[in-house]
Image (cartoon, rainbow, N blue to C red):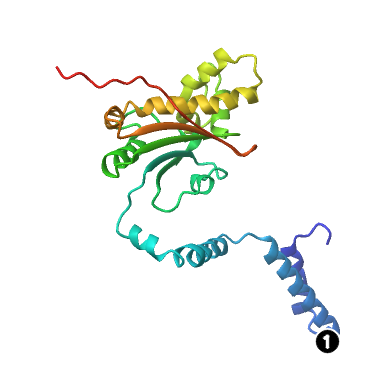
Amino acid sequence: MGSETYEEAIAALSKLLSDKADLGSVAAAKIKQLTAELEAAVGSTQFDPVKRIETGFLHFKKEKYEKNPDLYGELAKGQSPKFLVFACSDSRVCPSHILDFQPGEAFMVRNIANMVPPYDKTKYSGVGAAIEYAVLHLKVENIVVIGHSCCGGIKGLMSIPDDGTTASDFIEQWVSICSPAKTKVKSENNELSFSEQCTNCEKEAVNVSLGNLLTYPFVREAVVKKSLVLKGAHYDFVNGKFDLWNLDFKITPTLAV
């Protein structure tokens, strides 16, 4: 039985009980006990996603929702977040967890490698809709693009061959949004290791995304009017560091002729 799975062992014991109805009471009881123990062991090793979700929500409801009736009462009336945050979909870098954002504080967009594509009404309409809603309707005052350490999306960008050959349906085309960051890092830091280049690119890609934000007319107008501030950030979860910076775009108001 050394190579059998728990399920196979349980099935074999159950068959033994049904086939050998004349087993002594002690032997039958022992087999039933072993069967129950094996079933319990199987249950303890299997992940139950429904149970995890139920447990998580009950904890939230008890520890957060029910203890903050005023907060959730106000949120039921609407939202007025101060931040629009672009963050990576990576499960290790949840902005609410890292920056202790409370419900209602930050409107969020998460995608592969926390990228902001340039203005395009058809190709990137999903991201455009989120930016438009946040800036024009929610009137957010800050847009923060947060990169992070060990980013698989950036590693993928840095690994795209020079001939542009792709090996995926979506990923490489998406991360190519920040190809200018890759080009800059490879030209200025060619002596660095691939890992070090990826770390630099994680930050340069944030700067490219900040520049892309200015291709959205309503973002540019809000920045010119100083009602909106753009910031870049990088979260290093390996060393527990968080860097935040501004970019000087040297933007001047459009002259009215």
> Does 109 appear above or below 207?
below
The foreground one among 109 and 231 is 231
Q: Is residue 11 visible?
A: no
Residue at position x 42%, y 28% in the image? 209
Up the image or down, 223 lies above or below 66; here it is above
Task: Tell me if 55 is positioned left or right of 218 in this view.
Answer: right
**Crowd around label 1: few <14 · some 14–19 · many ≥20 (10 Å):** few
Q: How many marks?
A: 1
Name the residue beneath numbered marker 1: 25
User: Residue 42, located in which quarter of the rendered image?
Assistant: bottom right
**Residue that appears at 36% across and 44% down:** 82
Q: Amino acid at mark 1?
A: Ser
Q: Which residue is more in the foreground, 103 or 54?
A: 103
Q: Residue placed at 80% from the left, 82% from the top?
A: 29
Q: Is residue 92 visible?
A: yes
Residue ranking furthest to the left: 257
Q: Quadrant of the C terminus?
A: top left
Q: Position of residue 177 (x, y in %)?
A: 44, 26
The quarter of the image holding the N terminus is bottom right
Counting from the top left corner in percent of width and height, residue 222 is at 28, 32
Question: Of 66 and 211, which appears nearest the observer?
Answer: 66
The x, y position of residue 106, in whole percent, is: 40, 46
Q: Is residue 159 left or right of residue 249?
A: right
Q: In the image, residue 26 lies at what x, y percent?
A: 85, 84
Taking the spot 39% from the left edge, 30% from the top edge, the residue there is 117
SS of the residue under disc 1: helix
Up-down: is 89 above or below 160? below
